[in-house]
């Protein structure tokens, strides 16, 4: 395993993971990872990320209660990107 950390590669990988979780119907996980990704201004302020990532996750997640969505967002904002990436790799 390489011992380098490129945050842009990490960010795109996390975005892909969030989208894949949403496609699999794992909306809670997708919302948490999305919240982590949105801590980066590149994602938060991007129209492209809004269309490609945020909308396809947030729209189906409307089935989750607003209170639960808020909790998932808060939890996701507290995640560490590198630790989350390692956990996701270990799940596959």
Image (cartoon, rainbow, N blue to C red):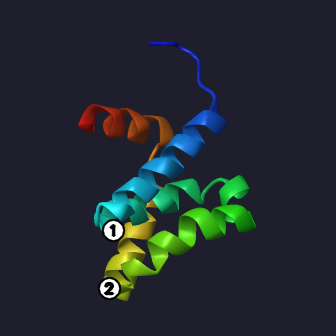
| Callout count | 2
Q: Is residue 46 visible?
A: yes
Could you tell me which residue is drawn at 73 percent across and 68 percent down? 47
Q: Splitting the image into 4 quarters, where does residue 23 fall?
A: bottom left
Q: Residues within 10 Å of mark 1 (few under 14, many from 20)?
A: many
* Circle 1: element type: helix
In the picture, measured across the screen, residue 2 lies left or right of residue 21, that is right
Q: Residue at x 56, y 37 (%)?
A: 10
Placement of 43 over or under 82, stated as above or below? below
- Left or right, 9 with respect to 25, comes to right
Mark 2 surroundings within 10 Å by alpha-carbon count, few (fewer than 14), some (14 through 19), many (20 or more): few
Residue at figure coordinates x 56%, y 54% from the top left: 37
Q: Indicate whether 75 appears above or below 67.
A: above
Provide the residue designation for mark 2. Answer: 63
For the residue pair 68 and 12, the one nearer the viewer reads as 12
Left or right of 5 in this view: 46: right
Q: Are marks 1 and 2 in contact (CB under 8 Å)?
A: yes
Measure the C-alpha gap from mark 1 to mark 2: 9 Å
68 or 92, nearer to the observer = 92
Numbered label attached to residue 1: none
Residue bearing mark 1: 27
Q: Residue at x 32, y 66 (%)?
A: 28
């Amino acid at each position: 395993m390489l011992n380098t950390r490129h945050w842009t590669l990490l960010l795109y990988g996390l975005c892909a993971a969030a989208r894949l979780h949403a496609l699999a119907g794992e909306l809670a996980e997708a919302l948490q990872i999305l919240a982590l990704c949105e801590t980066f201004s590149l994602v938060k302020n991007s129209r492209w990320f809004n269309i490609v990532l945020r909308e396809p996750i947030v729209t189906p997640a409307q089935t989750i209660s607003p209170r639960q969505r808020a909790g998932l967002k808060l939890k996701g904002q507290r995640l560490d990107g590198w630790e989350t990436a390692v956990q996701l790799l270990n799940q596959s």
